Structures are given as C-alpha cells and as structure tokens.
Image (cartoon, helix red, strand yellow):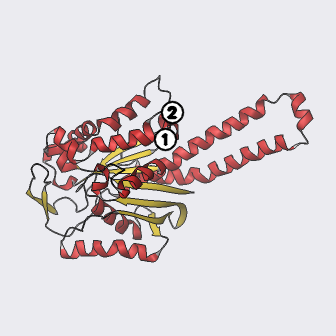
C-alpha cells in the first residue's frame, strides 16, 4: 500500500516549520511511530534547516515550488505503509492553474491524494476579523479546490481524509486556549465553513454519500512550545504577525494530525474493502443450488471465493495497524463537526 498525502495552505501559515518539526520528531520516533525516508539524503535535507532553526533561532525559509518525497511509516520498527509527502509553497493555492505550472500540479495532486493536511495560522484566526482570517488563510481557495476535485458528485464517492492543522497555538491570547481551545476551534470552523458544512451535511440522514468516506478533524499545534516565542508585531492588512523565537523550540502535538491522516485513510480503505467483501458474499448467496451444481467445477465460483478470501486477508493485515495509529491520533484530534 502506498498513500499520497498533500500538505497545503496559504502563504505564511507555518507549513515549512510544521513539516521540519514533524520529520525531525518522527525520524527518531514518537509514541512508537517512526518515519523513514526511502533515500537517506531526503532526511538530511529536512534535518539541516531544522538544526539551523533550533541553533541559530532563525525561522526557516519558506518552501519554494513543489516538493515530493517518499517515506515509510513504521510502528515499533514494523512496516505500516509507504506514503508520498507533497508540500507546496503558499502562493500556489491563489494562482489559476492556467497561469502557473505549480498551481496546475497542485490541482492534480489534490485530485490524486488519499489525504490532505491543511495548515492554517491559529493566531490569525483568533485575532483578525473573520473575513480577513478567511482571506489570509486562503480558506475559500482551499474549499474551492476540494469542492472541484473531491466534493462534487462526479468524484464524491472516492472520498478523502482531511486534517486541519492550526499552527502557532503557542502565542494565542489566553481566552483562545481556555477550555481546550474551545473558542479557537469554534472560530476556525467558521473560517473554514465550506469544508465544515460539507462534512456536516454528510451526517444528515438523507445524505447520499457515506460519512466514513470523508473523515475530518482539527487540532491546534505548536512548533516551538508554550512560552518559547513572543509576538513582536500582531500584523495588519496583508502582513502576518512577526514572531520572535525566545528559546529553543519543543514541538507539541505535531504528530497527531499526521497520524490521523494516515490512520483514517487506511481505515477508509478498510471500509471500502469490507463493502467489497460483502458484495462478493452477496453474489455468492444469490447463486441458487441449481446454478451452483452446474458451475461447481467451473472457474466462476472458485474465483468468487478466492476474491473474498483475498479481501479478507487484506482486512486482517490492516486491522491491527489501523487500531495502533488511530488509538494514538484520536487522543488529541477534534472532529471538524462536533
């Protein structure tokens, strides 16, 4: 199995530092999980800017263009799945696909992705008027892309897993961190109301799309850790907040959205396999005795049984891996629709 996870969001939302922190923390392992690059040089390319960030207290340069790397996820050193990690510069989301090759590729990547991780600045969401927060986080652009390539009826039954990552949670005003970030989560759901509303409609009894096709959750994260950064300038207009790194960073909660994306996507695949298995079982049960007697020595009945057994074996292999991942991720993740 190989999954494709695309990380994207508006300019300056924290995608680069989130990626560096995630790969640094999971290169050695956290909660039993470890990420291993298929090429050793790939890990080095990510670890070097993280080292400079920690030691020199300089924010890393933003991602330029598109980057795609291949990794393996392991649990207690046992293989779980391969995945491709696709990362984009923020500006790609705001450009028409006929004006930029990167924008066109982003559209294609979203269409092909098993899971998407949307990165948004929690401080911007908390401190700016809602309409400004929507524009600065590019939430309308994000919904437009997901709506065109995943939510519309033509492709809606393919589904996708969505994790909304709220960065810079370490510099939030106290009222937005109180009660387990209740006020922040409420406002973030409003800022990303297009995605929230779509997921909400899936929960209605008359929905024609199975809700499990679109798992979606949200979580505030910190790259530097509480107390390790301060706001120099809150920002105005197009300018985001200027943040100073006061002491060495200690990432918090950053692996949960990633594990949610991987685990729930594997679970979604398993649910699809279960439907296939039930379909095969149904076809077998519909064959009456006279038909069975006629084709018992033919290939049809054997092929159906073999198909069912193959699906059952895949489900048996997936189940413990899914449980291991989701049991960790769900400790922290909050559903997009409460």
* Residue 193 image position (x, y, % from top left): 29, 35
* Residue 171 image position (x, y, % from top left): 16, 54
Residue 215 in view (yes/no): no
Q: Circle 2 sits on which residue?
A: 210
Q: Quadrant of the C terminus?
A: top left
The reply, left or right, for residue 3 in relation to residue 142 is right
Q: Are marks 1 and 2 in contact (CB under 8 Å)?
A: yes
Spatial CA distance of label 1 from label 2 is 9 Å
The reply, left or right, for residue 331 in relation to residue 136 is right
Q: How would you rate the neighbour count of disc 1 (Cα within 10 Å): few for under 14, some for 14-19, many for 20 or more? A: many
The answer to which quarter of the image holds residue 317 is bottom right
Q: Which mark is residue 279?
A: none
Residue appearing at x 14%, y 51% in the figure: 238
* Residue 234 image position (x, y, % from top left): 9, 53
Residue appearing at x 20%, y 67% in the figure: 59
SS for callout 1? loop
Mark 1 vs mark 2: which is more N-terminal?
A: 1
Q: Which mark is residue 159?
A: 1
In this rendered view, identify the residue nearer to me: 227 or 50.
50
């Amino acid at each position: 199995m190989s999954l494709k996870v695309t990380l994207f969001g508006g300019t300056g939302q924290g995608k680069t530092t989130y990626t560096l922190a995630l790969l640094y923390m999971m290169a050695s392992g956290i909660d039993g999980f470890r990420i291993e690059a298929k090429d050793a040089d790939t890990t080095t390319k990510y670890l070097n800017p993280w080292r400079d960030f920690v030691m020199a207290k300089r924010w890393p340069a933003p991602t330029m263009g598109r980057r795609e790397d291949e990794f393996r996820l392991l649990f207690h050193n046992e293989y779980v799945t391969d995945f491709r990690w696709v990362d984009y510069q923020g500006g790609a989301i705001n450009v028409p696909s006929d004006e930029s090759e990167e924008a066109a590729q982003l559209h294609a990547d979203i269409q092909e992705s098993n899971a998407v991780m949307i990165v948004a600045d929690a401080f911007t969401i908390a401190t700016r008027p809602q309409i400004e927060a929507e524009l600065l986080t590019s939430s309308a652009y994000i919904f437009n892309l997901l709506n065109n390539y995943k939510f519309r009826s033509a492709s809606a039954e393919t589904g996708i897993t969505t994790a909304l990552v709220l960065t810079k949670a370490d510099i939030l005003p106290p009222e937005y961190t109180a009660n387990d970030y209740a006020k922040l989560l409420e406002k973030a759901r409003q800022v990303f109301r297009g995605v929230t509303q779509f997921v909400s409609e899936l929960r209605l009894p008359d929905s024609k799309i199975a809700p499990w096709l679109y798992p979606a959750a949200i979580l505030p994260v910190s790259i530097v850790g509480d107390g390790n950064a301060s706001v120099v300038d809150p920002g105005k207009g197009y300018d985001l907040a200027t943040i100073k790194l006061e002491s060495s960073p200690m990432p918090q909660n950053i692996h949960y959205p990633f594990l949610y994306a991987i685990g729930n996507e594997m679970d979604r695949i398993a649910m699809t396999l279960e439907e296939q298995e039930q379909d095969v079982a149904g076809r077998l049960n519909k064959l009456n005795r006279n038909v069975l007697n006629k084709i018992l020595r033919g290939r049809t009945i054997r092929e159906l049984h073999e198909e069912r057994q193959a699906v059952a074996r895949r489900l048996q292999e997936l189940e413990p891996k899914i449980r291991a991942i989701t049991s960790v991720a769900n400790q922290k993740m909050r559903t997009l629709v409460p």
